[in-house]
Image (spheres, rainbow, N blue to C red):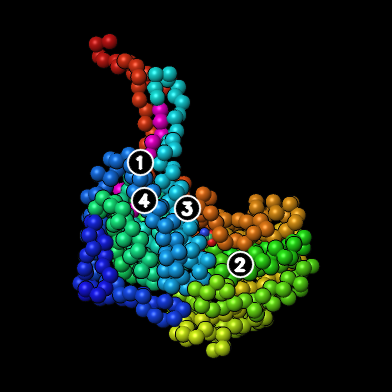
Amino acid sequence: MSDAYQHYIDGEWRDSDGDSFTSENPATGETLGRFQRATDEEPDRAVSAAETAFEEWRSLSRIDRAEYLWDIYHELRDRHEELGRAVTRECGKEISEGKADVTEAWHMVEWAAGDARHPKGDVVPSEIPAKDAYMRRKPRGVTACITPWNFPVAIPFWHMAVTLVEGNTVVWKPAEQTPLCGQIIAEMFDDVGVPDGVFNLVQGFGDTGAAMVDDDRVRTVLFTGSAEVGHQIAEAVAGDPSKRAACEMGGKNAIVVTEEADLDIAVHAAVMSSFKTTGQRCVSSERLVVHTDVYDEFKQRFVEVAEEIAVGDPLETETFMGPLIEADHVDKVSSYNDLARTEGVNVLVDRTDLPDAEVPDGHEEGHWVGPFVYEADPAEPLRCTHEEVFGPHVALLEYDGDIERAIEIHNDTDYGLAGAVISEDYRQINHYRDHAEVGLAYGNLPCIGAEVQLPFGGVKKSGNGYPSAREVIEAVTDRTAWTLNNDEDIEMAQGLSADIKTRKD
Ligand code: UN1
């Protein structure tokens, strides 16, 4: 299968005996590359390589490990334009988003590599003056990283940068929709000469991810993706107390617009949150909870933008929304739009089937879907206002009364990832901050665009892990409470006698 890109295992590019699959540009249908699909053998080999490499890698200093990451950092910066275009071509996000994906990646690498020179652990007091007590961290070992297609460069580095600096080794499976970005990243690791087996790339589908999760030698699983798969992973590791999974899943995120809101900010934040990445961020908002006093004006202004928003070639800087990722996803989003009608909502904008005239030349094979906006009764238990669609499918939910009512609607979902409040009243903002059931909360901002220095992750069904910066350290290391006696005698705390008494005494 020489025409297909290979796996990268133990410092070598390797063929497998499996089938191959292609990566397609979702805006044009153009084939971007052919990739070997892992059989059972590749995850097994990659985990073996990572297990063998672990002892030597963990024995380097954190600073030495981070030097490899600094080289990657420079590659990401030097190749920003080229990589940003690759992201856009492979996953369809408009070009400023493609480039931002790469920027977010180097921010994370910068954080992780810079952190290597920072003090780590705590010096803890002891009741015994001659005892020195410390909290130290040790790497756990082989880490499986399973990442989604919508941030094909940033999220892999959320997972891998800190994990590697902490001394773990990695087996990575990128999403099957974005194997080319995976290939480019693996080439970078190869170029900077990371020791063999420390970083391994296995290209494949869900069966490959499952094989990695089930492998007893894998100590930690980092996963970002759908709630369905995340819950399967959490269940799969639940039976093994030595194994750990940090899973970050989806959301049915909401923005609350109060009666005190600045509507310029409200409309701007809602449009960004609902339509950037064509609604395909786990943090995208699919619900806008708007106070009755400003509802009509907000609705009119939001609908006006949704009608006009530029859907088209994501490589063009004039475009706001690119295509959806794949044909199946068009079916899914369209069926939720149909479901909303069946559930009796009032449709305000329906650009589900983009007219041919709006599809740019040469992009007829793209997976085009425009905004779908409707109003619904927040008191109704509708599926369309409670299930994650992962597309430009947006409900306006009108509320009357105080901020408590808005919060009830906001929290009326199994998920709890991201949300925002738009208001000029600091009491309402503070109430939202304290009562919104989300891991990422924003005031007078969109609910997308988190920065790497903050924890990233949700509550409720949205996940059990924070796969960003500091929190990844918790996931990929074990703590040791280390106590050293500097005296010649043993003295115990809590009044515990250290005298040894024998029958002769
Ligand atoms: C995701 O949608 O899966 O907060 C991640 C943001 C980005 C990451 C989104 N930093 O929008």
Q: Mark 4 points at which residue?
A: 71
Magenta stretch?
133-143
Q: Does the magenta stretch include residue 138?
A: yes
Q: Earlier in the sequence, mark 2 or mark 3?
A: 3
**Badge nearest the viewer, 4 or 1:** 4
Q: What residue type is labelled 3?
A: His
Q: Which of marks 4 and 2 is nearer the N terminus?
A: 4
Question: CA–CA distance between discs 3 and 4?
Answer: 13 Å
Q: Please, what secondary structure does the residue beneath circle 2 have?
A: helix
Q: Residues within 10 Å of mark 1 (few under 14, many from 20)?
A: some
Question: CA–CA distance between discs 2 and 1?
Answer: 39 Å
Vertical position of residue 307 compared to residue 158: above or below? below
Residue at point 57%, 61% (across, down)? 448
Question: CA–CA distance between discs 3 and 1?
Answer: 18 Å
Q: Earlier in the sequence, mark 3 or mark 4?
A: 4
Vertical position of residue 307 compared to residue 76: above or below? below
Q: Which amino acid does label 4 sit on?
A: Asp
Residue 428 x/y as whole percent? 73, 55
Question: CA–CA distance between discs 4 and 2?
Answer: 33 Å
Q: Please, what secondary structure does the residue beneath circle 4 have?
A: helix
Q: Mark 1 points at which residue?
A: 62
